[in-house]
Image (tube, helix red, strand yellow):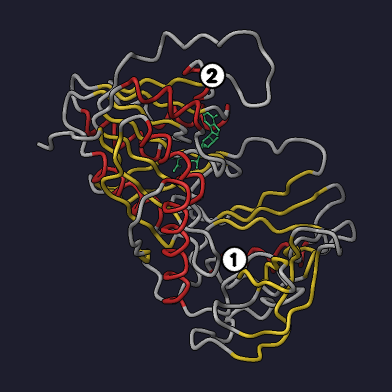
Amino acid sequence: GHCVARHHGRVVFVRHSLPGERVRARITEGSPGDRFLRADAVAVLTASSDRVGPPCPVAGPGMCGGCDFQHVSLRRQRRLKGEVVAEQLSRLAGLEREVEVEPLDDEEGLRYRTRVEFAVSPEGTIGLRRHRSHDVLAVPGCPIAVPEVDEALAAAREDGVPEGIRAVDVVVPSGEADTVLVEVPADSPTPPIPLREEVAAPGGEVGMGVDARGFWQVHRAAPRAFVTAVLEAAGVRPGERVLDLYCGVGLFSLHLAAATGEGGQLLAVESDERAVGHLRENLAGQPGALVLPGRVDDLLGVPRKGRRRRGRPARSELLPPSADVVVLDPPRTGAGRGVIEALVPLRARRIVYVACDPAALARDTAHLLAGGYDLVSLRAFDAFPMTHHVECVAVLEPRGAVLG
Ligand SMILES: C[S@@+](CC[C@H](N)C(=O)[O-])C[C@H]1O[C@@H](n2cnc3c(N)ncnc32)[C@H](O)[C@@H]1O
């Protein structure tokens, strides 16, 4: 979300700017000896033709930290994200390819988010945090959120929040009649709040359980779009064995299990306890599905980063020695070298990697290339318009594999 500028040889990351622009930038972070500085473009001297007026009144220097592309035309936002994905693949995996970022169903990049966590200041102000700050800005609403979120924000302000609440999480589940407002305590865990989400996937609409604070794709069109893309990418054949790693409540697992059919097997791995509870319920009607609670690295016998331990931990006996297809959707840090190297011996005929961080995807792709896989396709989706975030679905196959 920042542009890279140089001032007297020093790198300056400039927010609220666009490549090729000439701006006056105010340094917001950094000291004279630092390798790089951060800055905000406070005046535009030569504007890019892709610059637009931000649709959000609190997007700009010193204001809301949520979106970083409000001042960029949607077309250019997508081109920029495509360039970033391409650049990461080139730098970190040595792969050259053009990446086109596909829109989901929104035409203007607004009113798509079904989940927004509003911060609550010690004085009781409900809003969004200023960029890289603890200050809470009393935003009038959030134009990238579905309208129900703004209504819930207004209601929360009217009612006020009790002391000891650090955030108000607004969730608009597709399978519930009402918006859910979760008051997040400052110093204790939020109690479980089970919700229903409806996913209009290729095989018909399915209902799934998820916790209000648990992981769920935030763009209202993302669950359907990603299930469709993953199913297509995985190309599961009846009777196959499929691993769905970092599977959350089973958004992909449910559909992958159905695709393996009778005689097939789906193993779903997830570490979050609450998500595992929902996962078990969501997969209850799939006889070939097996839930493996725990961390992917632990199950694969990969030592955890930063943990000192003698010898290599044991690989779980519940994990089979081979798989036909592996789907993985790790958090932003990626799966990491150890996990990727432990996946290669499974000899999957296809690996589908769902990634929310292009650099992590590129790093893990490099490990897969070293393990004998080739990147055969890559799709990128604009699941977070107005921000720099982008979601990718990459397909890898063993080098020299004969298709058929
Ligand atoms: C990006 S989400 C994907 C969830 C699911 N594919 C979806 O689209 O709803 C990543 C999931 O991985 C889980 N996770 C994070 N680290 C993990 C680990 N080391 N092992 C297993 N699961 C992990 C998180 O709890 C989260 O549910």
- The percent position of residue 222, horizontal first and vertical second, equals 41, 55
Kind of element beneath mark 2: helix
The residue shown at (65%, 64%) is: 66
The residue labelled by disc 1 is 1
The residue shown at (33%, 13%) is: 321
Relative to the observer, which residue lies in front, 94 or 37?
94
Viewport quadrant of the C terminus: top left
Q: Is residue 17 above or below residue 292?
A: below
- The percent position of residue 401, horizontal first and vertical second, equals 18, 33
The residue shown at (53%, 56%) is: 172
Q: Is residue 161 above or below residue 403?
A: below
Say few, some or many: other residues with alpha carbon within 10 Å of mark 1 (under 14 / 14 to 19 / 20 or more): some
Is 7 situated left or right of 114 in this image?
right
Q: Is residue 54 above or below residue 31?
A: below
Kind of element beneath mark 1: loop
Relative to the observer, which residue lies in front, 351 or 6?
6
Instruction: Report the residue that reaches farthest toward the left.
Output: 404
Relative to the observer, which residue lies in front, 11 or 202?
11
Viewport quadrant of the N terminus: bottom right
- The percent position of residue 315, horizontal first and vertical second, equals 47, 11
Amino acid type indicated by mark 2: Asp
- C-alpha distance separating marks 2 and 1: 34 Å
Q: Is residue 311 above or below residue 340?
A: above
Q: Nearer the viewer, mark 2 or mark 1?
A: 1
Instruction: Report the residue that reaches farthest toward the bottom.
Output: 45
Please give the label number shown on residue 298: 2
Ligand 1 closer than 8 Å to label 2 CB: yes
